[in-house]
Image (cartoon, helix red, strand yellow):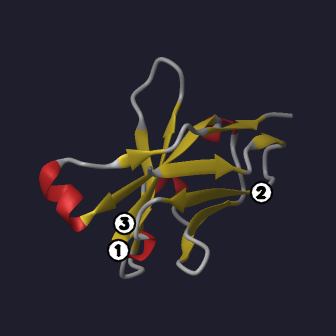
Amino acid sequence: QVQLVESGGGLVQPGGSLRLSCAASGIRFSGYDMYWYRQVPGKQRELVAVITSRGNTNYTTSVKGRFTISRDNTKNTVFLQMSSLKPEDTAVYYCKAQSEIGRMTGMDYWGKGTLVIVSS
């Protein structure tokens, strides 16, 4: 049974920092690309960052220079370090795991999300 469990969300003031974690089980973690998405109620889910199985990273423009995605294959965990947070970063943050085969078949796995609120 595959599980992705996000943690680390919470309330933070503008300009502050948070580190999100996503712990995976039931998959060969090192072989999966890992993604962070976010969603505001009433809006589409937005891709925030991705780290491939090889360690390559990419970010949506609005978070470049502020967010850093990383992974620890020994702990089956992906992280999202968020700095210089803005109110518009407020959302539920989800992690997703997808293998190379999954990219061809459409198979992926999602966590249930962690809420980040940026407010004074």
* Quadrant of res 92: top right
Extreme left residue here? 104
In the picture provided, is 65 more to the left or to the right than 83?
A: left
Q: Residue furthest top?
A: 42
Task: Tell me the quadrant of the picture where the C terminus can be found.
Answer: top right
Residue 31, label in figure: 1
* Secondary structure found at label 3: strand
Residue 70: % across, % down: 55, 72
Amino acid residing under circle 3: Asp
* Residue 17 found in image quarter: bottom right
In contact (CB < 8 Å): disc 3 and disc 1: no
Q: Which amino acid does label 2 sit on?
A: Ser
Of mark 2 and mark 3, the one earlier in the sequence is: 2
- Residue 103 drawn above or below residue 75: above
Where residue 67 sits: x, y (%)? 60, 62
Residue behind mark 3: 33
Q: Name the residue under label 2.
A: 17
| Place of residue 52 in the rendered image (x, y in percent of width and height, measured from the top left) | 37, 72
Question: Which residue shows up at 75% across the image and 38% down it?
Answer: 118
Answer with left or right where residue 104 lies relative to residue 59: left
Question: Comparing marks 2 and 3, which lies closer to the viewer?
Answer: 3
Q: Nearer the viewer, mark 3 or mark 1?
A: 1
Instruction: Please tell me how crowded label 1 is: few (under 14), some (14-19), or many (20+) other residues with Cα within 10 Å.
Output: some
